[in-house]
Image (cartoon, helix red, strand yellow):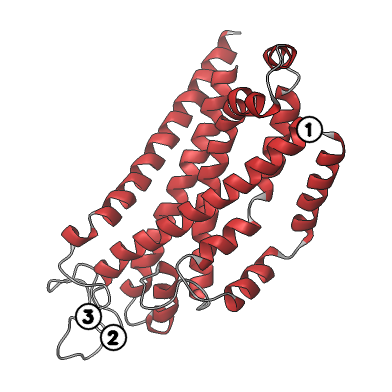
Amino acid sequence: MAETTVVGLGSAARSRRFFLVGAIMVGALVLAAAAAPWLTPYDPDAIVVMAYRGPLGPGNGHLFGTDTVGRDVWARVLYGARTSLFVGTLAMAISLVIGMAIGLAAGYFGGLVDAVLMWVVDLFLTMPSLLLLIVLATVLPPSIFTIPLVIGLLGWTTFGRTVRGEVLTLRERDYVQAARALGATDARIIVRHLVPGVLPGVIVLAALGMSGAIIVDAGLSYLGLGVPLPTPSWGRMVSDAQTYVGVAPWLVVAPGVAIALAVVGLNLIGYGLIDLLAERRA
Protein backbone atom coordinates (compact mmCIF):
# COMPACT_ATOMS: atom_id res chain seq x y z
CA MET A 1 0.00 0.00 0.00
CA ALA A 2 2.80 2.37 0.94
CA GLU A 3 4.67 1.48 -2.25
CA THR A 4 1.56 2.26 -4.32
CA THR A 5 1.22 5.62 -2.61
CA VAL A 6 4.86 6.50 -3.28
CA VAL A 7 4.50 5.51 -6.94
CA GLY A 8 1.34 7.60 -7.23
CA LEU A 9 3.05 10.62 -5.70
CA GLY A 10 5.99 10.20 -8.06
CA SER A 11 3.66 10.05 -11.07
CA ALA A 12 1.81 13.17 -9.90
CA ALA A 13 5.09 15.04 -9.39
CA ARG A 14 6.29 14.02 -12.86
CA SER A 15 2.99 15.13 -14.38
CA ARG A 16 3.27 18.51 -12.67
CA ARG A 17 6.77 18.90 -14.05
CA PHE A 18 5.56 18.01 -17.54
CA PHE A 19 2.75 20.53 -17.27
CA LEU A 20 5.03 23.25 -15.89
CA VAL A 21 7.68 22.77 -18.58
CA GLY A 22 5.04 22.72 -21.30
CA ALA A 23 3.35 25.83 -19.91
CA ILE A 24 6.69 27.67 -19.84
CA MET A 25 7.47 26.70 -23.43
CA VAL A 26 4.06 27.66 -24.78
CA GLY A 27 3.88 30.76 -22.60
CA ALA A 28 7.24 31.94 -23.94
CA LEU A 29 5.99 31.52 -27.52
CA VAL A 30 2.78 33.39 -26.76
CA LEU A 31 4.68 36.26 -25.12
CA ALA A 32 7.17 36.37 -28.01
CA ALA A 33 4.32 36.50 -30.54
CA ALA A 34 2.49 39.22 -28.61
CA ALA A 35 5.65 41.30 -28.11
CA ALA A 36 6.99 40.83 -31.66
CA PRO A 37 6.95 44.56 -32.54
CA TRP A 38 9.08 45.29 -29.47
CA LEU A 39 11.44 42.33 -29.87
CA THR A 40 12.57 43.20 -33.40
CA PRO A 41 12.89 46.49 -35.26
CA TYR A 42 12.35 44.79 -38.62
CA ASP A 43 9.23 44.20 -40.66
CA PRO A 44 8.99 40.45 -41.36
CA ASP A 45 8.37 41.08 -45.07
CA ALA A 46 10.87 43.89 -45.59
CA ILE A 47 14.19 43.33 -47.35
CA VAL A 48 16.67 44.63 -44.79
CA VAL A 49 19.94 43.93 -46.62
CA MET A 50 20.68 46.66 -49.13
CA ALA A 51 23.62 45.02 -50.94
CA TYR A 52 22.35 41.45 -51.07
CA ARG A 53 24.88 38.69 -51.70
CA GLY A 54 23.03 35.72 -50.25
CA PRO A 55 21.75 34.72 -46.80
CA LEU A 56 23.65 36.36 -43.93
CA GLY A 57 24.55 34.26 -40.91
CA PRO A 58 23.48 35.07 -37.35
CA GLY A 59 24.99 38.27 -36.04
CA ASN A 60 25.59 41.74 -37.48
CA GLY A 61 22.30 42.99 -36.08
CA HIS A 62 20.34 39.93 -37.20
CA LEU A 63 19.91 37.38 -34.40
CA PHE A 64 19.04 34.48 -36.74
CA GLY A 65 20.57 35.96 -39.87
CA THR A 66 18.66 36.78 -43.04
CA ASP A 67 16.87 34.56 -45.53
CA THR A 68 17.24 33.96 -49.25
CA VAL A 69 15.80 37.35 -50.23
CA GLY A 70 17.35 39.41 -47.45
CA ARG A 71 14.56 39.39 -44.82
CA ASP A 72 15.32 39.14 -41.11
CA VAL A 73 14.74 35.53 -39.96
CA TRP A 74 14.18 36.46 -36.29
CA ALA A 75 11.38 38.83 -37.28
CA ARG A 76 9.77 36.19 -39.49
CA VAL A 77 9.97 33.57 -36.72
CA LEU A 78 8.31 35.94 -34.25
CA TYR A 79 5.50 36.95 -36.59
CA GLY A 80 5.21 33.35 -37.78
CA ALA A 81 4.42 32.42 -34.17
CA ARG A 82 1.36 34.66 -34.41
CA THR A 83 0.24 32.81 -37.53
CA SER A 84 0.77 29.31 -36.11
CA LEU A 85 -0.83 30.07 -32.74
CA PHE A 86 -3.81 31.73 -34.44
CA VAL A 87 -4.32 28.79 -36.79
CA GLY A 88 -3.92 26.24 -33.99
CA THR A 89 -6.27 28.07 -31.61
CA LEU A 90 -9.01 28.72 -34.16
CA ALA A 91 -8.85 25.20 -35.60
CA MET A 92 -9.04 23.71 -32.10
CA ALA A 93 -11.97 25.97 -31.18
CA ILE A 94 -13.92 24.94 -34.30
CA SER A 95 -13.27 21.25 -33.65
CA LEU A 96 -14.19 21.64 -29.98
CA VAL A 97 -17.52 23.37 -30.66
CA ILE A 98 -18.61 20.87 -33.33
CA GLY A 99 -17.35 17.82 -31.42
CA MET A 100 -18.91 18.86 -28.11
CA ALA A 101 -22.27 19.64 -29.71
CA ILE A 102 -22.42 16.27 -31.47
CA GLY A 103 -21.03 14.32 -28.50
CA LEU A 104 -23.45 15.91 -26.03
CA ALA A 105 -26.45 15.33 -28.26
CA ALA A 106 -25.51 11.73 -29.08
CA GLY A 107 -24.69 10.76 -25.52
CA TYR A 108 -27.63 12.47 -23.84
CA PHE A 109 -30.51 11.66 -26.20
CA GLY A 110 -29.28 8.22 -27.32
CA GLY A 111 -31.45 6.07 -29.55
CA LEU A 112 -31.90 7.22 -33.13
CA VAL A 113 -30.11 10.52 -32.49
CA ASP A 114 -27.05 8.66 -31.20
CA ALA A 115 -27.11 6.20 -34.11
CA VAL A 116 -27.32 8.92 -36.77
CA LEU A 117 -24.66 11.14 -35.22
CA MET A 118 -22.25 8.25 -34.68
CA TRP A 119 -22.81 7.24 -38.29
CA VAL A 120 -21.70 10.75 -39.27
CA VAL A 121 -18.64 10.40 -37.03
CA ASP A 122 -17.75 7.04 -38.58
CA LEU A 123 -18.24 8.53 -42.05
CA PHE A 124 -15.72 11.29 -41.30
CA LEU A 125 -13.29 8.76 -39.81
CA THR A 126 -13.33 6.69 -43.01
CA MET A 127 -12.41 9.68 -45.15
CA PRO A 128 -8.74 10.23 -46.10
CA SER A 129 -8.29 13.34 -43.96
CA LEU A 130 -4.91 14.37 -45.34
CA LEU A 131 -6.15 14.15 -48.92
CA LEU A 132 -9.27 16.12 -48.03
CA LEU A 133 -7.17 18.76 -46.29
CA ILE A 134 -5.06 19.21 -49.38
CA VAL A 135 -8.07 19.30 -51.72
CA LEU A 136 -10.04 21.78 -49.59
CA ALA A 137 -6.99 23.99 -49.00
CA THR A 138 -6.52 24.08 -52.78
CA VAL A 139 -10.16 24.67 -53.73
CA LEU A 140 -11.19 27.22 -51.11
CA PRO A 141 -10.17 30.89 -51.49
CA PRO A 142 -6.75 31.51 -49.89
CA SER A 143 -7.10 33.26 -46.55
CA ILE A 144 -5.64 33.11 -43.07
CA PHE A 145 -9.05 31.78 -41.99
CA THR A 146 -9.24 29.03 -44.61
CA ILE A 147 -6.64 26.69 -43.11
CA PRO A 148 -7.98 26.69 -39.52
CA LEU A 149 -11.52 26.30 -40.89
CA VAL A 150 -10.52 23.26 -42.95
CA ILE A 151 -8.55 21.70 -40.09
CA GLY A 152 -11.36 22.34 -37.63
CA LEU A 153 -14.08 20.92 -39.88
CA LEU A 154 -12.12 17.70 -40.35
CA GLY A 155 -10.69 17.32 -36.85
CA TRP A 156 -13.72 17.26 -34.53
CA THR A 157 -14.35 13.50 -34.46
CA THR A 158 -12.08 12.82 -31.47
CA PHE A 159 -13.91 15.46 -29.45
CA GLY A 160 -17.27 14.01 -30.48
CA ARG A 161 -16.49 10.39 -29.56
CA THR A 162 -14.81 11.32 -26.27
CA VAL A 163 -17.61 13.63 -25.14
CA ARG A 164 -20.24 11.05 -26.08
CA GLY A 165 -18.52 8.41 -23.97
CA GLU A 166 -18.33 10.74 -20.97
CA VAL A 167 -21.98 11.77 -21.32
CA LEU A 168 -23.17 8.15 -21.48
CA THR A 169 -21.72 7.72 -18.01
CA LEU A 170 -22.68 11.10 -16.58
CA ARG A 171 -26.33 10.95 -17.64
CA GLU A 172 -26.89 8.01 -15.25
CA ARG A 173 -25.49 9.85 -12.23
CA ASP A 174 -27.85 10.55 -9.34
CA TYR A 175 -27.65 14.35 -9.64
CA VAL A 176 -28.66 14.19 -13.31
CA GLN A 177 -31.56 11.86 -12.52
CA ALA A 178 -32.61 14.17 -9.68
CA ALA A 179 -32.54 17.22 -11.97
CA ARG A 180 -34.65 15.37 -14.52
CA ALA A 181 -37.14 14.30 -11.81
CA LEU A 182 -37.46 17.92 -10.65
CA GLY A 183 -38.52 18.96 -14.14
CA ALA A 184 -35.27 20.48 -15.45
CA THR A 185 -35.25 20.92 -19.19
CA ASP A 186 -32.85 18.97 -21.39
CA ALA A 187 -30.96 22.16 -22.21
CA ARG A 188 -30.51 23.01 -18.51
CA ILE A 189 -29.32 19.50 -17.67
CA ILE A 190 -26.79 19.55 -20.51
CA VAL A 191 -25.44 23.02 -19.71
CA ARG A 192 -25.49 22.86 -15.90
CA HIS A 193 -24.63 19.21 -15.24
CA LEU A 194 -23.08 17.54 -18.28
CA VAL A 195 -20.84 20.23 -19.76
CA PRO A 196 -18.88 20.78 -16.50
CA GLY A 197 -18.40 17.01 -16.26
CA VAL A 198 -16.83 16.67 -19.71
CA LEU A 199 -14.71 19.82 -19.59
CA PRO A 200 -11.59 18.26 -17.96
CA GLY A 201 -11.23 15.69 -20.72
CA VAL A 202 -12.03 18.28 -23.38
CA ILE A 203 -9.29 20.58 -22.08
CA VAL A 204 -6.73 17.78 -22.47
CA LEU A 205 -7.93 17.07 -26.00
CA ALA A 206 -7.80 20.78 -26.80
CA ALA A 207 -4.11 21.00 -25.89
CA LEU A 208 -3.26 17.90 -27.91
CA GLY A 209 -5.53 18.97 -30.77
CA MET A 210 -3.90 22.40 -30.97
CA SER A 211 -0.46 20.83 -31.32
CA GLY A 212 -1.80 18.62 -34.11
CA ALA A 213 -3.31 21.64 -35.87
CA ILE A 214 0.03 23.46 -35.76
CA ILE A 215 1.75 20.44 -37.33
CA VAL A 216 -0.89 20.21 -40.07
CA ASP A 217 -0.60 23.94 -40.75
CA ALA A 218 3.19 23.63 -41.00
CA GLY A 219 2.81 20.68 -43.38
CA LEU A 220 0.33 22.49 -45.62
CA SER A 221 2.50 25.61 -45.61
CA TYR A 222 5.49 23.47 -46.55
CA LEU A 223 3.51 22.25 -49.56
CA GLY A 224 2.57 25.84 -50.44
CA LEU A 225 -1.07 25.38 -49.39
CA GLY A 226 -0.97 27.21 -46.05
CA VAL A 227 -1.78 30.81 -45.23
CA PRO A 228 -1.26 33.03 -48.29
CA LEU A 229 1.77 35.21 -48.84
CA PRO A 230 3.10 37.52 -47.53
CA THR A 231 1.94 36.28 -44.10
CA PRO A 232 4.97 34.68 -42.36
CA SER A 233 4.58 30.96 -41.71
CA TRP A 234 7.02 28.54 -40.09
CA GLY A 235 6.23 25.75 -42.56
CA ARG A 236 6.71 28.00 -45.58
CA MET A 237 10.02 29.24 -44.12
CA VAL A 238 11.26 25.65 -43.96
CA SER A 239 10.04 25.00 -47.50
CA ASP A 240 11.69 28.13 -48.91
CA ALA A 241 15.02 27.30 -47.23
CA GLN A 242 15.31 23.59 -48.00
CA THR A 243 17.64 24.07 -50.96
CA TYR A 244 19.96 26.22 -48.84
CA VAL A 245 20.19 23.90 -45.84
CA GLY A 246 23.79 22.98 -46.67
CA VAL A 247 25.08 26.56 -46.82
CA ALA A 248 22.57 28.35 -44.55
CA PRO A 249 21.26 25.85 -41.99
CA TRP A 250 19.91 28.60 -39.74
CA LEU A 251 17.12 29.18 -42.25
CA VAL A 252 15.69 25.73 -41.43
CA VAL A 253 16.80 25.44 -37.81
CA ALA A 254 15.06 28.61 -36.59
CA PRO A 255 11.49 27.82 -37.77
CA GLY A 256 12.02 24.10 -37.15
CA VAL A 257 12.91 24.71 -33.50
CA ALA A 258 9.92 27.04 -33.16
CA ILE A 259 7.57 24.33 -34.48
CA ALA A 260 9.14 21.76 -32.13
CA LEU A 261 8.79 24.06 -29.10
CA ALA A 262 5.11 24.71 -29.82
CA VAL A 263 4.23 21.06 -30.47
CA VAL A 264 6.28 19.58 -27.62
CA GLY A 265 5.07 22.25 -25.19
CA LEU A 266 1.40 21.65 -25.97
CA ASN A 267 1.86 17.88 -25.76
CA LEU A 268 3.57 18.19 -22.38
CA ILE A 269 0.63 20.27 -21.17
CA GLY A 270 -1.85 17.71 -22.48
CA TYR A 271 -0.11 14.62 -21.10
CA GLY A 272 0.58 16.36 -17.81
CA LEU A 273 -3.10 17.20 -17.48
CA ILE A 274 -4.10 13.59 -18.18
CA ASP A 275 -2.32 12.30 -15.08
CA LEU A 276 -3.26 15.29 -12.94
CA LEU A 277 -6.95 14.90 -13.77
CA ALA A 278 -6.77 11.16 -13.18
CA GLU A 279 -5.21 11.81 -9.77
CA ARG A 280 -7.96 14.33 -8.96
CA ARG A 281 -10.71 11.86 -9.89
CA ALA A 282 -9.07 9.12 -7.81
Quick one: quadrant of the N terminus? top right
Q: Residue furthest left?
A: 60
Instruction: Relative to 194, say whether 182 is above or below.
Output: above
Q: Earlier in the sequence, mark 1 or mark 3?
A: 3
Q: CA distance from mark 1 to mark 3?
A: 62 Å
Q: CA distance from mark 2 to mark 3?
A: 10 Å
Question: Residue 167: image x %, image y %?
Answer: 71, 29
- Of residues 192 and 212, the one drawn nearer to the viewer in this rendering: 192
* Label 1 close to label 3 by CB (< 8 Å): no
Relative placement, left or right, of 279 versus 186 is: left
Relative placement, left or right, of 119 versus 240 is: right
**Amino acid type of the residue tagged 3 in the rendering:** Leu
At numbered mark 1, what does the secondary structure look like: helix, strand or loop? helix
- Of residues 57 and 192, the one drawn nearer to the viewer in this rendering: 192
Report the residue at 22% width, 80% height from top: 56
Relative placement, left or right, of 15 versus 28 is: right
Q: State the mark number for residue 56.
A: 3
Tell us which disc is closer to us: 2 or 1. Answer: 1
The residue at which mark 2 appears reads as 69
At numbered mark 2, what does the secondary structure look like: helix, strand or loop? loop
Report the residue at 49% width, 74% height from top: 222
Q: Quadrant of residue 181?
A: top right
Instruction: Relative to 128, say whether 11 is above or below.
Output: above
Question: Residue 60: image x %, image y %?
Answer: 12, 74
**Amino acid type of the residue tagged 2 in the rendering:** Val
Q: Residues within 10 Å of mark 3 (few under 14, many from 20)?
A: many
- Of residues 13 and 166, the one drawn nearer to the viewer in this rendering: 166
Q: Earlier in the sequence, mark 2 or mark 1?
A: 2
**Amino acid type of the residue tagged 1 in the rendering:** Phe
The residue at which mark 1 appears reads as 109
Q: Earlier in the sequence, mark 2 or mark 3?
A: 3
Report the residue at 47% width, 42% height from top: 268
